[in-house]
Amino acid sequence: MMVETDNDVVIRSASTSDAGAIARVHLTSWRSAYAHVLPADYLESLDVGERTAEWEKILHQGRSSTIVAEADGRTLGFASYGPSRDEDAEDDCLELYAIYLDPEAWGRGVARDLMRTMLGDVGPRARITLWVLSENERAHHFYRRHGFQPDGIERMEDIADVPVTELRFVREPER
Protein backbone atom coordinates (compact mmCIF):
# COMPACT_ATOMS: atom_id res chain seq x y z
CA MET A 1 0.00 0.00 0.00
CA MET A 2 1.21 3.49 -0.84
CA VAL A 3 -0.86 6.67 -0.70
CA GLU A 4 0.33 10.17 -1.50
CA THR A 5 -1.61 12.89 0.31
CA ASP A 6 -2.38 16.50 -0.49
CA ASN A 7 0.31 17.72 1.92
CA ASP A 8 3.25 15.84 0.32
CA VAL A 9 3.08 13.04 2.89
CA VAL A 10 3.43 9.47 1.70
CA ILE A 11 1.63 6.76 3.63
CA ARG A 12 2.82 3.22 3.10
CA SER A 13 2.86 -0.18 4.74
CA ALA A 14 5.57 -0.52 7.38
CA SER A 15 8.32 -3.12 7.24
CA THR A 16 10.67 -4.36 9.95
CA SER A 17 13.22 -1.78 8.78
CA ASP A 18 10.82 0.92 10.03
CA ALA A 19 10.89 -0.34 13.64
CA GLY A 20 13.44 2.21 14.86
CA ALA A 21 11.63 5.18 13.33
CA ILE A 22 8.27 3.95 14.65
CA ALA A 23 9.79 3.52 18.14
CA ARG A 24 11.22 7.05 18.05
CA VAL A 25 7.86 8.56 17.04
CA HIS A 26 6.04 6.41 19.60
CA LEU A 27 8.21 7.59 22.51
CA THR A 28 8.44 11.22 21.38
CA SER A 29 4.67 11.36 21.10
CA TRP A 30 4.13 9.73 24.51
CA ARG A 31 6.53 12.19 26.15
CA SER A 32 4.59 15.15 24.77
CA ALA A 33 1.02 13.85 24.90
CA TYR A 34 1.18 12.33 28.38
CA ALA A 35 3.49 14.78 30.19
CA HIS A 36 0.50 16.09 32.16
CA VAL A 37 -0.57 12.56 33.18
CA LEU A 38 2.54 10.44 33.75
CA PRO A 39 5.70 11.16 35.79
CA ALA A 40 8.49 12.88 33.87
CA ASP A 41 11.10 10.40 35.14
CA TYR A 42 9.05 7.49 33.78
CA LEU A 43 8.61 9.14 30.37
CA GLU A 44 12.33 9.92 30.18
CA SER A 45 13.19 6.33 31.15
CA LEU A 46 11.40 4.88 28.12
CA ASP A 47 14.09 3.27 25.98
CA VAL A 48 14.12 3.60 22.20
CA GLY A 49 16.16 0.40 21.86
CA GLU A 50 13.64 -1.64 23.83
CA ARG A 51 10.72 -0.12 21.94
CA THR A 52 12.51 -0.79 18.62
CA ALA A 53 12.83 -4.48 19.56
CA GLU A 54 9.11 -4.58 20.40
CA TRP A 55 8.22 -3.03 17.05
CA GLU A 56 10.55 -5.39 15.17
CA LYS A 57 8.70 -8.31 16.75
CA ILE A 58 5.26 -6.83 16.00
CA LEU A 59 6.16 -6.09 12.39
CA HIS A 60 7.83 -9.46 11.87
CA GLN A 61 4.85 -11.42 13.24
CA GLY A 62 2.49 -9.75 10.79
CA ARG A 63 -0.61 -10.23 12.97
CA SER A 64 -1.55 -6.59 12.51
CA SER A 65 -1.27 -3.91 9.86
CA THR A 66 1.01 -0.95 10.44
CA ILE A 67 1.29 2.06 8.18
CA VAL A 68 3.76 4.93 8.36
CA ALA A 69 3.50 8.53 7.21
CA GLU A 70 6.66 10.04 5.75
CA ALA A 71 7.76 13.35 4.29
CA ASP A 72 11.21 14.36 3.11
CA GLY A 73 12.58 10.93 4.07
CA ARG A 74 11.45 11.29 7.69
CA THR A 75 8.82 9.26 9.52
CA LEU A 76 6.17 11.61 10.91
CA GLY A 77 3.72 9.10 12.33
CA PHE A 78 2.24 5.64 12.23
CA ALA A 79 -0.95 3.69 12.85
CA SER A 80 -1.28 0.04 13.80
CA TYR A 81 -4.51 -1.98 13.65
CA GLY A 82 -5.82 -5.52 13.51
CA PRO A 83 -8.22 -7.94 15.20
CA SER A 84 -9.80 -6.62 18.38
CA ARG A 85 -8.26 -7.83 21.63
CA ASP A 86 -11.38 -7.00 23.66
CA GLU A 87 -13.00 -9.86 25.56
CA ASP A 88 -16.44 -8.95 24.25
CA ALA A 89 -15.38 -8.47 20.61
CA GLU A 90 -17.07 -10.33 17.83
CA ASP A 91 -14.81 -12.20 15.41
CA ASP A 92 -14.91 -9.54 12.70
CA CYS A 93 -14.31 -6.57 15.03
CA LEU A 94 -11.09 -4.63 14.50
CA GLU A 95 -9.06 -2.45 16.85
CA LEU A 96 -6.92 0.59 16.24
CA TYR A 97 -4.02 -0.32 18.53
CA ALA A 98 -2.02 2.86 18.08
CA ILE A 99 -1.87 6.08 16.12
CA TYR A 100 0.95 8.43 17.03
CA LEU A 101 2.67 11.41 15.46
CA ASP A 102 5.92 13.17 16.04
CA PRO A 103 4.77 16.30 17.91
CA GLU A 104 6.36 18.43 15.16
CA ALA A 105 3.73 16.99 12.80
CA TRP A 106 0.74 17.76 15.06
CA GLY A 107 -1.83 20.00 13.40
CA ARG A 108 -0.58 19.35 9.85
CA GLY A 109 -3.23 16.80 8.81
CA VAL A 110 -0.91 13.78 9.07
CA ALA A 111 -3.06 11.99 11.67
CA ARG A 112 -6.12 12.65 9.51
CA ASP A 113 -4.32 11.12 6.53
CA LEU A 114 -3.27 8.05 8.56
CA MET A 115 -6.84 7.61 9.85
CA ARG A 116 -8.38 7.98 6.38
CA THR A 117 -5.90 5.48 4.97
CA MET A 118 -6.64 2.97 7.74
CA LEU A 119 -10.40 3.43 7.34
CA GLY A 120 -10.08 2.99 3.58
CA ASP A 121 -8.10 -0.20 4.11
CA VAL A 122 -10.62 -1.81 6.48
CA GLY A 123 -13.68 -0.60 4.59
CA PRO A 124 -16.97 0.98 5.70
CA ARG A 125 -18.49 -2.25 6.99
CA ALA A 126 -15.88 -2.81 9.70
CA ARG A 127 -16.61 -2.28 13.40
CA ILE A 128 -13.51 -0.69 14.93
CA THR A 129 -12.67 -0.03 18.57
CA LEU A 130 -9.84 1.85 20.24
CA TRP A 131 -8.77 2.72 23.76
CA VAL A 132 -7.78 6.24 24.80
CA LEU A 133 -6.83 7.83 28.11
CA SER A 134 -9.76 9.66 29.65
CA GLU A 135 -7.55 12.75 30.10
CA ASN A 136 -6.61 12.94 26.41
CA GLU A 137 -9.27 15.40 25.21
CA ARG A 138 -7.32 16.22 22.04
CA ALA A 139 -7.55 12.56 20.99
CA HIS A 140 -11.24 12.34 21.96
CA HIS A 141 -12.00 15.24 19.61
CA PHE A 142 -9.93 13.69 16.81
CA TYR A 143 -11.65 10.30 17.09
CA ARG A 144 -15.12 11.84 17.19
CA ARG A 145 -14.35 13.72 13.97
CA HIS A 146 -13.69 10.34 12.36
CA GLY A 147 -16.92 8.69 13.47
CA PHE A 148 -15.81 7.09 16.76
CA GLN A 149 -17.92 7.49 19.89
CA PRO A 150 -17.37 6.34 23.48
CA ASP A 151 -19.47 3.24 24.19
CA GLY A 152 -19.47 3.53 27.99
CA ILE A 153 -16.84 0.83 28.60
CA GLU A 154 -13.88 1.87 30.75
CA ARG A 155 -10.85 0.09 32.12
CA MET A 156 -8.29 1.01 34.71
CA GLU A 157 -4.59 0.62 33.95
CA ASP A 158 -1.55 1.27 36.06
CA ILE A 159 1.26 3.06 34.20
CA ALA A 160 4.33 3.93 36.25
CA ASP A 161 2.34 3.52 39.47
CA VAL A 162 -0.22 6.04 38.21
CA PRO A 163 -3.78 4.75 37.90
CA VAL A 164 -5.27 5.88 34.59
CA THR A 165 -8.69 5.38 33.11
CA GLU A 166 -9.03 4.37 29.49
CA LEU A 167 -12.24 4.83 27.54
CA ARG A 168 -13.28 2.63 24.65
CA PHE A 169 -14.40 4.40 21.50
CA VAL A 170 -16.23 2.54 18.72
CA ARG A 171 -16.86 3.24 15.08
CA GLU A 172 -19.87 1.25 13.98
CA PRO A 173 -20.08 -0.18 10.47
CA GLU A 174 -22.09 1.55 7.80
CA ARG A 175 -25.28 -0.30 6.99
Image: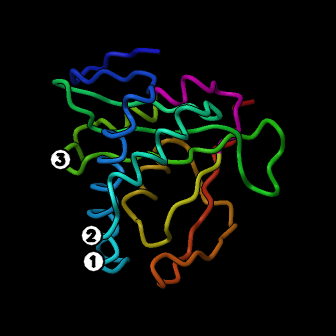
Q: Position of residue 80 (x, y in %)?
A: 51, 39
Q: Quadrant of residue 13?
A: top left
Please tell me whether mark 3 or mark 1 is closer to you in this view.
Answer: 1
What are the residue bounds of the magenta stretch?
117-128
In magenta segment, residue 127: yes
Q: Reply above or below: 70 against 149.
A: above
Alpha carbons under labels 3 and 1: distance apart? 20 Å
For disc 2, the marked residue is 44
Circles 1 and 2: CB atoms closer than 8 Å: yes
Residue at x-position 26% and y-position 47%: 102
User: Mark 3 or mark 2: which comes first in sequence?
Assistant: 2
Residue at x-position 35% and y-position 51%: 49
Please tell me whether mark 1 or mark 2 is closer to you in this view.
Answer: 2
Which element type, helix, strand or loop, lies under badge 3? helix
User: Mark 3 or mark 1: which comes first in sequence?
Assistant: 1
The figure's colour scheme reads rainbow
Q: Quadrant of residue 61?
A: top right
For disc 3, the marked residue is 104
Which element type, helix, strand or loop, lies under badge 2? helix
Residue at x-position 41% and y-position 66%: 136
For disc 1, the marked residue is 40
Other residues around mark 1 within 10 Å, as few (<14) / some (14–19) / many (≥20)? few
Q: Classify residue 129 as left or right of residue 108.
A: right
In magenta segment, residue 106: no
Alpha carbons under labels 1 and 2: distance apart? 6 Å
The kind of residue on which mark 2 rests is: Glu
The kind of residue on which mark 3 rests is: Glu
Other residues around mark 2 within 10 Å, as few (<14) / some (14–19) / many (≥20)? few
Alpha carbons under labels 3 and 2: distance apart? 18 Å
Q: Reply above or below: 119 against 91.
A: above
Q: Position of residue 79 (x, y in %)?
A: 46, 39
Q: Position of residue 52 (x, y in %)?
A: 39, 46
